[in-house]
Image (tube, coloured by chain):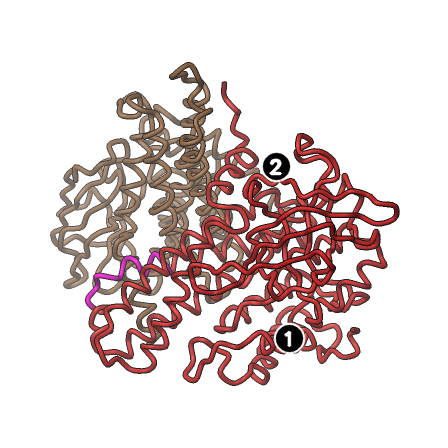
């Protein structure tokens, strides 16, 4: 909306590149996936130019996250974009942007800092078993930790998501290699919200397309399923849900571009809309598949597993509590 | 009127216009008009008429209409700004919204120059209130089945039929009337629009008492009513199709203040609950946090459906049927909120403060009137049909 025509063309081009890149790297081992996605320029969208990035705003990352969600990309992409940008001024930035190092974030838990060393258990870190670098929240901000450092133990966390699985990491007296202050890490967390929203939106739209395909071809009672109004209305509600996520993201992008105060609430709203309406649409698409929807083969459960995992990583429940608290405080 | 009587300084746009709207509202809202303030008294029709006429002089209505017809010649961006500011105050609903948001845009699109001159200024000055004569006993959501007939009789039209759910009819001077010039089997063809005078011989209005106790809508009996040729809008076969195009845009742009009024209501609810020890305790307990947060998000989504539409229309792009997305979401979210407000306030202890009692009364009204929001302007089921058929373009199936 407030993007210039050139910017809009740029965003559309990103979407196209991202779709191809996501499809091309399916089935590759993690390291090759990293190099391939980096080669397609997807990792440097937010990173500064000094780190080999494009130094663009969040709006340009949305189509890429959307494509990653729709295409079931097995890679901690939001984490890569955010860590690459946050550490752009260090040697780690370029390594991440070029796909030489895999970075991830422990979204849950906090490590204690004593004598400059980190200790504690953190969790919700996607693909930590294949990653090189982990960003961990600490009581004084956040710290980047090499996962092969002494004192690091990685364990599977047995979450819903199986393809980019989450891990728990125990840290005992681990020396960090780079730091972020509290405010920078808080901003990073806020920036993650619209990225996840875009991914869930992409996943929901993909599931809607699958449901539409299914009901348009399957016949029951001598008619194609799409001729039944109950199912048409369910599809319409899925579309409504997808459009809620898109509209909320578009509004967030517009407010961010004008540096408006409401941008932060808009980013949270986009994520809350995605976790509520987007996930609802995925579940509804599964329902429209009937028994097929409950099979391993139909991909909808994979989207659902991811979307629910992003919901937990972003702490949607806590976000709702904070939104309510904000409302109460504003009306005291 | 002309803009000579307007107090809107010329060439005021964007944030300068917002500053004007804010200052004007701060100086001009009548005593007791705001439903979330102490001393609120529901304004009567005369007070609402005077208020809306004043808003027009202040440059807050008729914003995008050409100055030649009493409008202010500004863009939809200023229309949005005025709606944001008006919405954030608990002002009464317009008593002429069907005139301003339905009849006028259709007149601007298909009316003759003479008709625009004749209908639009009195509408903005609130001399003429309009009602909408579309629905009939056998043609509600399915307007193509309507039976009210208009036949040419020399130079005039003679109309016979019956309209129902005619919002605003008891107070209206004009009716935007949809009637058939051919036979019922023609469905959408042969439908024509008229600006019928409500004081014409043969027009009988029977108010219908609504479930919220008000008498806003009515039955309108039309017995051999003569409508002058000059009051026919557009050619008999073109009126309806033009109206449908206008309505798709109107669904997205009318009552644009809804998101901000919704926000005003939410803030009023929370403020009131926090003023009462027991209700404050309920809110702080956390049981209601999820629903309150979801309401905040619902409001953000309404805004997100409204604001980009303005930018697209300003850029000359088509918005298709996107208005259905906003209408459907807003009406359902507002009903959820109204139920939440009722649930909370009905837990107020006996002897609660006048502030709590006033809020109870406001949210009881809102709860009841919200039941209509998923019915009027295209029911939820009609909106789902539009999203499926026209936005998703679902195959019909076989």
Q: How many marks?
A: 2
Q: Residue at x 27, y 66 (%)?
A: B344
Task: Measure the C-alpha gap from mark 1 to mark 2.
Answer: 39 Å
**Residue A149 badge:** none
Residue lying furthest top = A222
In the rendered image of this protein, which colour is used for chain B?
red
> For mark 2, what is the residue?
B145
Q: Residue B196's spot in the image, x, y percent?
A: 73, 56
Q: Residue A211's spot in the image, x, y percent?
A: 40, 27
In the rendered image of this protein, which colour is used for chain A?
brown
Q: Residue at x 65, y 78 (%)?
A: B54
Q: Can residue B126 be seen in this snapshot?
A: yes
> For mark 1, what is the residue?
B55
Task: Give the class, few, some or many, for how many residues have Cα within 10 Å of label 1's Cα (few <14, many ≥20).
Answer: many
Q: Earlier in the sequence, mark 1 or mark 2?
A: 1
Q: Residue A135's spot in the image, x, y percent?
A: 27, 51
Q: Is residue B275 left or right of residue B304?
A: left
Looking at the rendered structure, the secondary structure element under dot 2 is helix
Q: Residue at x 44, y 60 (%)?
A: B369
Which quarter of the picture shows residue A235?
top left
Front position in the image: B314 or A12: B314
Q: Residue B314's spot in the image, x, y percent?
A: 67, 55
Looking at the rendered structure, the secondary structure element under dot 1 is helix
User: What stretch of residues is rendered in magenta?
Assistant: B285-295
Q: Quadrant where the N terminus of chain B lies?
A: bottom right
- Magenta stretch: includes residue B394: no
């Amino acid at each position: 909306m407030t993007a210039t025509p050139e910017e809009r063309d740029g965003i559309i081009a990103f979407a196209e590149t991202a779709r191809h890149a996501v499809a091309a790297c399916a089935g590759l081992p993690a390291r090759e996936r990293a190099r391939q996605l980096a080669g397609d320029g997807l990792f440097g969208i937010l990173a500064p130019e000094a780190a080999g990035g494009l130094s663009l705003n969040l709006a340009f990352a949305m189509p890429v996250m959307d494509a990653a969600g729709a295409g079931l990309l097995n890679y901690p992409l939001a984490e890569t974009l955010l860590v690459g940008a946050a550490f752009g001024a260090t040697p780690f930035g370029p390594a991440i942007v070029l796909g030489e190092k895999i970075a991830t974030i422990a979204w849950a838990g906090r490590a204690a800092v004593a004598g400059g060393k980190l200790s504690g258990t953190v969790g919700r870190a996607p693909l930590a078993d294949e990653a090189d670098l982990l960003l961990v929240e600490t009581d004084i901000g956040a710290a980047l930790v090499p996962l092969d450092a002494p004192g690091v133990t990685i364990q599977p966390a047995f979450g819903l998501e199986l393809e980019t699985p989450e891990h728990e990491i125990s840290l005992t007296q681990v020396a960090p290699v780079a730091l972020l202050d509290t405010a920078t890490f808080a901003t990073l967390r806020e920036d993650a919200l619209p990225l996840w929203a875009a991914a869930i939106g992409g996943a929901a739209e993909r599931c809607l397309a699958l449901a539409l395909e299914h009901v348009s071809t399957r016949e029951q009672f001598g008619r194609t399923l799409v001729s039944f109004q109950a199912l048409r209305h369910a599809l319409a509600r899925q579309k409504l849900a997808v459009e809620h996520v898109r509209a909320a993201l578009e509004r967030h992008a517009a407010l961010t571009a004008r540096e408006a105060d409401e941008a932060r609430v808009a980013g949270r709203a986009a994520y809350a809309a995605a976790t509520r309406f987007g996930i609802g649409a995925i579940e509804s698409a599964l329902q429209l598949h009937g028994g097929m929807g409950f099979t391993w083969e139909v991909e909808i459960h994979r989207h659902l597993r991811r979307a629910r995992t992003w919901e937990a990583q972003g702490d949607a429940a806590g976000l709702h509590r904070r939104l309510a608290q904000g409302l109460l405080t504003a009306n005291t | 009127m002309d803009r000579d009587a307007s107090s809107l300084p010329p060439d005021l746009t964007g944030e300068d216009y917002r500053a004007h709207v804010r200052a004007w509202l701060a100086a001009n809202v009548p005593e007791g008009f705001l439903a979330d303030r102490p001393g609120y008294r529901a304004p009567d029709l005369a007070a609402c008429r005077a208020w809306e006429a004043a808003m027009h002089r202040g440059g807050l209505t008729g914003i995008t209409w050409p100055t030649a017809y009493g409008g202010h010649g500004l863009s939809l961006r200023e229309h949005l700004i005025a709606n944001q500011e008006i919405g954030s105050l608990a002002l009464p609903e317009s008593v002429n919204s069907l005139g301003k948001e339905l009849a006028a845009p259709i007149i601007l699109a298909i009316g003759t120059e003479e008709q625009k001159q004749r209908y639009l200024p009195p509408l903005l000055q609130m001399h003429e209130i309009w009602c909408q004569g579309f629905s009939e006993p056998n043609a509600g959501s399915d307007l193509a089945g309507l039976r009210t007939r208009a036949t040419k009789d020399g130079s005039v039209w003679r109309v016979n039929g019956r309209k129902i759910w005619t919002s605003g009819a008891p107070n209206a001077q004009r009716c935007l009337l949809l009637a058939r010039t051919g036979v019922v089997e023609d469905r959408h063809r042969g439908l024509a629009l008229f600006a019928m005078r409500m004081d014409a011989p043969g027009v009988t209005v029977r108010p219908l008492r609504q479930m919220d106790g008000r008498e806003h809508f009515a039955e309108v009996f039309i017995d051999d009513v003569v409508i002058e040729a000059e009051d026919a809008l557009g050619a008999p076969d073109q009126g309806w199709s033009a109206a449908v195009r206008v309505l798709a845009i109107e669904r997205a742009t009318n009552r644009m203040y809804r998101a901000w009024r919704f926000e005003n209501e939410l803030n009023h609810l929370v403020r009131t609950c926090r003023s009462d020890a027991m209700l404050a305790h309920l809110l702080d307990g956390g049981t209601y946090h999820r629903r309150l947060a979801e309401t905040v998000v619902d409001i953000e989504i309404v805004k997100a459906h409204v604001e980009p539409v303005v930018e697209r229309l300003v850029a000359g792009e088509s918005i298709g049927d996107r208005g259905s997305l906003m209408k459907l979401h807003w009406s359902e979210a507002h009903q959820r909120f109204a139920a939440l407000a009722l649930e909370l306030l009905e837990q107020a202890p006996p002897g609660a403060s006048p502030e709590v009692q006033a809020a109870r009364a406001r949210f009881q009204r809102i709860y009841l009137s919200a039941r209509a929001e998923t019915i009027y302007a295209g029911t939820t089921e009609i909106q789902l049909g539009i999203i499926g058929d026209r936005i998703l373009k679902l195959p019909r199936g076989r």
